[in-house]
Image (spheres, rainbow, N blue to C red):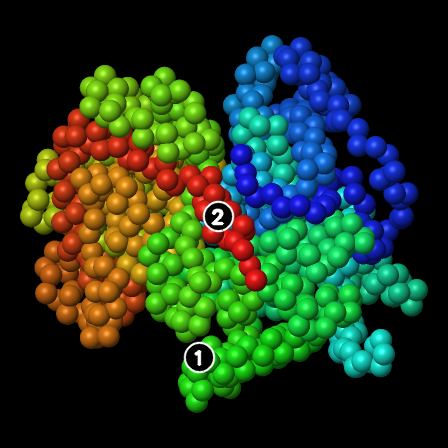
Amino acid sequence: MNEFQLSAPADFGPDEPSTNFRATGPQFPPTHHLADQPAVAPARDVDTFVQEFLEELNFGQGVPLDRSTINHQYLALASTVRSYLMADWLATAARRRAHPAKMVGYLSAEYLLGRQLGNALLNSDLEGIVEEAMRQLGIDLAAVRAQEVEPGLGNGGLGRLAACFVDSLATMDVSCIGYGIRYEYGIFRQTFVEGRQVEVPDTWLALGAPWEFRNPERAVQVDFGGSVESYAGDQGRPRRRWRPDWNVLAVPYNYMVPGYHNGVANTLRLWSAEATRAFDLQIFNHGDYAEAVRAQTFAENISKVLYPEDSTPQGKELRLQQQYFFVAASIGDYLHGTLPEDFDLARLPEQIIFQLNDTHPVIGIPELMRLLLDVHGMEWDQAWAITSRCFAYTCHTLLPEALEVWPVSLVERLLPRHMEIIFEINDRFLAAVRAQFPGDDDRVRRMSIIAEGGDRGVRMAHLATVAAVRVNGVAELHSQLLRDKVLVDFAQLWPEKFTNVTNGVTPRRFLVSANPPLTSLINDAIGGGWITDLERLRELEPYAEDPVFRERFRSAKRANKDHLNSTLLAAGTAQLPADHMLDVMVKRLHEYKRQMLKLLHIVSTYEGVLSGRVPAEQVTPRTCLFGAKAAPGYATAKETIYLINRVASVINSDPKLDGRLFVAFPPNYNVTLAQRLIPAADLSEQISLAGKEASGTGNMKLALNGALTIGTDDGANVEIRKLVGDDNFFLFGMREPEVAELQSRGYHPGEVYASNPVLKSAIDLIASGHFGDRGASQALMGDLVGNDRFMALADFQAYVDAQAQVDAKFADTEAWTRSAILNVARSGYFSSDRSMRDYLDRIWGAQVH
Ligand SMILES: *Cc1c(COP(=O)(O)O)cnc(C)c1O
């Protein structure tokens, strides 16, 4: 099924000990003289499963069934299921050794995986067996599933995308290894205390981590600091050599990534930092026990915590350490642990393509150069010919503040050899620019990898673009804006480098797993082929005209709402009123995403009733549901959360609204909650300022689950609207060129405020302290009317008008349901399987010279 096959041996498997790159630790005898044995696959029947489960419980957890806790049961069940995946993993590795193919090395600092148990059961087709086995044992499977703490090793869309991509590659049987960081603390758990966000550390490993297995034999030493020296190499050639002054050990933890019903399991390899033995032994030998322990803590800090900024990274030294740590470990693991020892590195681009998920792994480019130059003794031109064919770069943003720039002084101190190599790459690159555009010094300054000026910086996006075979944006509009604005000089120099791959989501997790009622409705209508061929959802289109199907569709939505309600009840969150439109805005809290615009619509509806402008009985019964974490240091975002919670508590208890408006904000939006919430949604809020949201994937998940979108012409909304049709989408607001035009003309939010009485009344009501904390309210409204960086006020009237169309359509139940079904039927394009097909066609299989 995949054409992504190239000749030449690639060796990648769980049983390959690392060879010439082993750091410390015991030496085990090599195992490759043993012939590949077929893996012993467990029998797939209920009795066998019960037996294996009890063995895991008794001999793995050390507890009899009648004394076991839910956590024991969860760990035993996970371990039992894992052994089935392990058999697939071994078989996949053996098959890949026998039929080598070019491999994808997906480099991502984040993987927002979501819970593993449900996904493993679904993909390995064990759901029926496990349900029956647990029933026979008297174990509550739902409670066991709820025991799992999801690995939250990502912030939001970018990390979730990486998780969807590795799922799709396994399902498509493409050889891929995902490389990342095993953060000890993932994204913080959000709680609310008197309406304010309070962050609690995410101790996801505390009760056991049954899905991973550590492989200390394949640990890689990662160096930092020190200096660079010259020496005479072969035939007296001048060479450079890094003399680092400290190091850590990167220890891999493997996760299996199962494909859907295909017996494939790929690898996700996450690195954890530990002190190297050489490092602390040296200090122990000096008799300083306390110092040795401190050193250990210092080393382990590197993979301790995920930085919780989304779109606005802080330029912290530890963050650069994390980036180099995982990339150096990954490239080292591949070059020196996976490839055969005698592999001819000139052929490296035939073996692997490293996909850079944003700029976080871009330090891998000078790292590969360093290995080829300094360790493998190549000359520059040869090393560059290889390196410049081994990476492809995905840009994820349009916000200038999200493009990473590292101070030259920091890179020099932490990675002095890499800084030299970056300067050399830049010198050679700028010489080529000068040759192409003689006398155009401005262009040279704009394109330089080094930002000059007071504090010189390394522009990681420029470095990535110079070295990559392909640069892609993540939706049509985003890729076009990359070419026309963000990287315009590069697109003029190398137009063929730039391409688009629109993001996607895995239908296994976000439809089959999350939405069983809709899944069985679809299966009854068109069979199950759509699960791995999502375009086949098109076959549902005629059913939109079938009143019986429409009623069944509504009843599936109701079941999902009930399920959501029971989840919220268990979590102690407010119950949602029955028979309301469920209007959902779930995504990270960011000004550009404009949660404030949604809040202004809510407050203006409420204010209309309070002031008598709108009779309460004319308000469409709606529940507006928010889910959003704010970066802990992002003050405006946290103030917005605080205001939403205050508005919710006033509106939900004001009898004047006659129960027609309800605002819910369950804390801690994560993948688990997304899977519960999205299937219940009627309306999807995708209201970012045009030209700011690169793609969005929440928009795709919601459309695929039959929510109608109210959205701006931004990111993948553009493609969603084109596919589902204007009649089934509520478009509003300025388009990107209008935004740019208004920006250059000069935007004055105060004038919009003063000239729109409905808007003014809503803002004034907030600022008056009606929702409590007058000081905080005034400050936030003052900033909005004074600055409004993302032009919420400019789009307010258009948004309110579009919401009136939403109300009108919702009143026509049959018309709404017809549109909802068409949203499902026409969202097949947004499968991450299709995204992977596009990467294979446009990027990974691309002919490179
Ligand atoms: C899909 C998803 C996101 C991304 O949402 P956007 O609306 O595209 O920003 C963020 N967080 C979680 C938990 C998700 O599942």
The kind of secondary structure element at disc 2 is helix
Q: Position of residue 464 (x, y in %)?
A: 54, 66
Q: Is residue 452 left or right of residue 27?
A: left
* Disc on res. 841: 2
From the Cβ of disc 1, is ligand 1 less than 8 Å away?
no
Q: Residue at x 66, y 29 (%)?
A: 88
Q: CA gap, disc 1 to disc 2?
A: 31 Å
- Name above or below for residue 446 compared with residue 682: below
Disc 2 residue type? Asp
Q: Residue at x 61, y 14 (%)?
A: 133
Disc 1 residue type? Arg
Residue found farthest to the bottom: 439
Q: Residue at x 42, y 48 (%)?
A: 503
Location of the C terminus by quadrant is bottom right
- Name above or below for residue 351 compared with residue 323: above
Near-viewer residue (441 or 281): 441
- Name above or below for residue 355 compared with residue 741: above
Q: Return the residue at label 1.
A: 446
Q: Position of residue 583 (x, y in %)?
A: 27, 40
| Marks 1 and 2, the one that precedes in the sequence | 1
Q: Is residue 460 left or right of residue 266?
A: left
In this view, the mark in front (1 or 2): 2
Q: Residues within 10 Å of mark 1 (few under 14, many from 20)?
A: some
In this rendering, does residue 836 appear at all? yes
Near-viewer residue (369 or 304): 369
The kind of secondary structure element at disc 1 is helix
Q: Residue at x 22, y 70 (%)?
A: 741
